[in-house]
Amino acid sequence: MTQYAFYFDNTRCTGCKTCELACKDYKNLSKDISFRKVYDYEGGTWNPCGSGAFECSSFVYHVSMSCNHCDNPACVSVCPTGAMHKDAQSGLVSVNEGRCIGCGYCHMACPYNSPKVDRQLGHSVKCDGCAARVSEGKAPICVEACPLRALEFGPVEEMQKLGERGRIAPLPNPKYTHPNIYIKEAQDARLYSSHEGSVVNVKEVL
């Protein structure tokens, strides 16, 4: 088995959302569903300190996130039909549409808000790591589209050499599912347990 993983360079990402739009276009997703999303995370203070000067400790950074194809995917463990499954060869998590009953347990269980229930189709949908492209030796479409080269994809043994396993805010503690996302953290990045900032584009990433 070759477990695939994403790498995200937090120091490069400008929050342009090209990755998100490329995915929506390639997968022909409705306007209400995104497999990849970009969190805008901001915090800090901007306080006057006399004589027209200001004391600034504000920060902002962006986190591009899709399904992390976890070692212990919560979506798989709660699926009552086995429709949500982890491929034995690639480690990529996907949905067997013919077995999915659209119960939404996967959506509720995933700490990364990855699976969605498409009510028009009647079943869950999610990022599958562009498995068809990967089988042809190509990168996922989000990786190929990123203009800043902030995303990479490959065997986990290679990706984990490039960064830390997804531990920055606003992501959850990686111990829960052991996500296969490795991140080069920007200087302003906060740890997952930090409450110094908040997601300012909540409606975009729900």
Image (cartoon, rainbow, N blue to C red):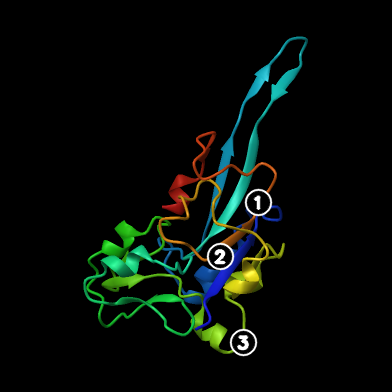
Q: Is residue 51 above or below residue 151?
A: above
Amino acid type, label 3:
Gly
Amino acid type, label 1:
Glu
Write down the residue under mark 1.
Answer: 185
Q: Crowdedness of circle 1 by 10 Å Cα count: few (<14), some, many (20+)?
A: many
Write down the residue under mark 2.
Answer: 21
Residues tagged 2 and 3 counted as in contact (Cβ below 8 A) = no
The mark found on residue 175 in the picture is none
The residue located at (76%, 14%) in the rendering is 52
Closer to the camera, 164 or 76?
Answer: 164
* Residue depth check, mark 2 versus mark 3: number of the one nearer the observer: 3
The residue located at (49%, 50%) in the rendering is 171
Closer to the camera, 43 or 206?
Answer: 43
Residue 49 point in image, percent of width and height: 71, 13
Q: Quadrant of residue 80?
A: bottom left
Q: Crowdedness of circle 2 by 10 Å Cα count: few (<14), some, many (20+)?
A: some
Amino acid type, label 2:
Leu
**Separation of disc 2 and disc 3 at Cα?**
22 Å
Closer to the camera, 135 or 162?
Answer: 162
